[in-house]
Image (spheres, rainbow, N blue to C red):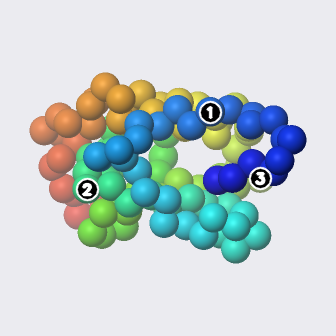
Amino acid sequence: MPVAAGAANPSPNPLPQGEGALELVSPSEPSQRGSQLSFRHPEAYALCQALIARGVIGDFRAPDVLRLGFAPAYLRFEDMARAGRELADILATGAWDRPEFRQRATVT
């Protein structure tokens, strides 16, 4: 997302870029997306399961969307920051690429 001229960027994007990167599919305008972000990734299901294994609850939408909710009534800023750090680590290390995370359950 663009940062206004003269504004400090609060944090650089820690997520991997290029092939295999997440694609934001939620509207980029905060007022249009509500309190969730949806990302497209070819291994969204495995990413979701790897996050759940680390205590970060997201959900998967077929065929390739990982969705994370950020409801301030239930989550603290630190919870949301941790979700971002965990997701970045899972992507950077390939931690999602394990058989147990690829095994599709009936309900996610």
At a point 47% along the width and 37% down the height, the residue shown is 15
In the rendered structure, are the residues bearing label 3 and label 2 in contact, judged by CB atoms less than 8 Å apart? no
In this orientation, which residue lies closer to the viewer: 86 or 75? 86
Q: Nearer the viewer, mark 1 or mark 2?
A: 1
- How far is disc 3 from disc 1 in space, using C-alphas? 26 Å
Does dot 1 land on a helix, a strand or a loop? loop
Name the amino acid, label 3: Ala
Taking 84 as reference, is 108 left or right? left
In this orientation, which residue lies closer to the viewer: 29 or 80? 29
Of the numbered discs 1 and 2, the one sitting upstream in the chain is 1
Q: Which disc, if any, is residue 12?
A: 1
In this orientation, which residue lies closer to the viewer: 6 or 67? 6
Taking 72 as reference, is 47 left or right? left
At a point 81% along the width and 51% down the height, the residue shown is 4
In the rendered structure, are the residues bearing label 3 and label 1 in contact, judged by CB atoms less than 8 Å apart? no
- How far is disc 1 from disc 2 in space, using C-alphas? 24 Å
Q: Is residue 86 above or below residue 4?
A: above
Name the residue tied to disc 3. 73
Of the numbered discs 3 and 2, the one sitting upstream in the chain is 2
Of the numbered discs 3 and 1, the one sitting upstream in the chain is 1
Local packing at callout 3 (Cα closer than 10 Å; few below 14, some 14-19, many 20+) is few
Does dot 3 land on a helix, a strand or a loop? loop
Q: What is the quadrant of the C terminus in the image?
A: bottom left
Does dot 2 land on a helix, a strand or a loop? loop
- How far is disc 3 from disc 2 in space, using C-alphas? 31 Å
Name the amino acid, label 2: Pro
Q: Position of residue 45 (x, y in %)?
A: 29, 53
Q: Which disc, if any, is residue 42?
A: 2
Q: Position of residue 25 (x, y in %)?
A: 48, 66
Taking 83 as reference, is 81 left or right? right
